[in-house]
Amino acid sequence: MAVLPKLLVFVWVSTIALSVLAFQQTQPELPIVISTWAFVDAVRAAAQHVIKEGGSAVNAVVRGCTVCEVLQCDGSVGYGGSPDEAGETTLDAMVMDGVCCASMDVGAVGALRSVKRAIETARLVMEHTEHTLLVGSQASAFSLSLGLPGPTNLSTDDSLQAWSQWEKGGCQPNFWRDVIPDSTSACGPYKVSALMSGQGDRSRVGGGISGKHRKSSFSKATGYGNHDTISMAVIDRNGRIAAGTSTNGASHKIPGRVGDGAIVGASAYADDDVGACGATGDGDVMMRFLPCYQVVESMRQGMTPEEAAKDSIARIRRKFPAFIGAVFAMNKYGVHAGACHGWIFQYTVQDSAMADAVVFTVKPDVL
């Protein structure tokens, strides 16, 4: 075997050492907490539990999301926001324990009524039942039977005022299509239009409204405050990964609607073997693609968090160019990235080496 000159060996070894040092300097230090948007208080609370107190990933996710529920983050999480067509606020939430080969347990609630603690209810579903998802008034009764506070009115003066203004504005925007009266100009009660019932020419708008003319609650200008979900993921000191979501859903939704916030793989996903993901945006579109499941599976196949996040968003964009949404991706080592479409996205991180939470800003690849 050829013998390398001593100077060359020294340079070669020094280069390796510097490369390792650079990697270590950029590698996050576990435990770590990551959340959609600039929900700094929520991330701080989760980080306090998992970093300072040595708590579990699941408990940290529940604690962090609960803080947002109490603070009514951006009016899109917790009580008193996003009233439906009847003026009522309902809640969606989920939590996932990513312990591989042992549990991969999930608990979720959809269209939760009269109970403020949505993600705590989701954890009760995960811990005390063999089900994954409970919905509506029955989910509320389940929560109350296990001791969570309530029943309580989830509406507030602000949410009722928002609902009243929406009605005065002709019930716009809304989520109906192919109905009478024309849902672009009047409030219900709605009836199925001739187009929808098979009568008349479906190429014409007629008495209903075609899909391409349908208005979305996300048709407004995007920016700070136009958010709809807290999704959070945590890796604890034992390497266990959990993820969860809490939201009051889309404003002016049709009563009974459950969004992606309650759907595992859509709003969040976690697997100890790989990493985790959180999502936010137009849930009715995004849940059709299970973007967070896709992110984790892409990382499992060797993609970096950045590649996986961008790929997941690109898959949706190809089918729905006008959708608005974002994801964050984090591998099991705490390396993280985000991707978005239709708006500028922010996510917040705190690891054990950080003195405080840090907000990262992500711009869309395609404007």
Image (cartoon, rainbow, N blue to C red):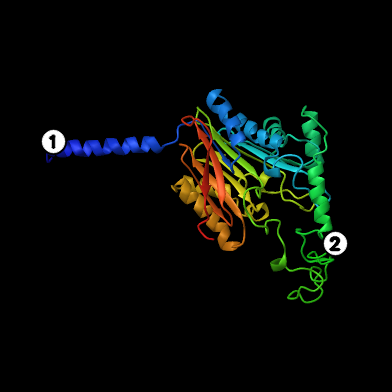
Numbered label attached to residue 6? 1
Q: In the image, what residue occupies the spot 75% across and 47% down?
A: 82
Quadrant (top left/top right/bottom left/bottom right) for the N terminus? top left
On screen, 204 above or below 337? Answer: below
Left/right of residue 62 with respect to residue 206 in the rendered view: left
On screen, 140 above or below 53? Answer: below
Q: In the image, what residue occupies the spot 81% across and 67% down?
A: 182
Q: Amino acid at mark 2?
A: Tyr
Q: In the image, what residue occupies the spot 82% across and 61% down?
A: 170
User: Quadrant of residue 118 in the image?
Assistant: top right
On screen, 110 above or below 117? Answer: below
Left/right of residue 345 with respect to residue 65 in the rendered view: left
Disc 2: CA contacts within 10 A as few (<14), some (14-19) or many (>=20): some
Q: CA distance from mark 1 to mark 2?
A: 84 Å
Residue 311: x and y in percent read: 50, 54
Q: Are marks 1 and 2 in contact (CB under 8 Å)?
A: no
User: Quadrant of residue 264 in the image?
Assistant: top right
Give the mark nearer the N terminus: 1 vs 2. Answer: 1
Callout 2: SS: loop
Q: Is residue 152 visible?
A: yes
Residue 252: x and y in percent read: 77, 53
The mark total stands at: 2
Residue 294: x and y in percent read: 54, 50
Q: Nearer the viewer, residue 115 or 102?
A: 115
Q: Mark 2 = which residue? A: 190
Left/right of residue 339 with respect to residue 171 in the rendered view: left
Quadrant (top left/top right/bottom left/bottom right) for the C terminus? bottom right
Q: Amino acid at mark 1?
A: Lys
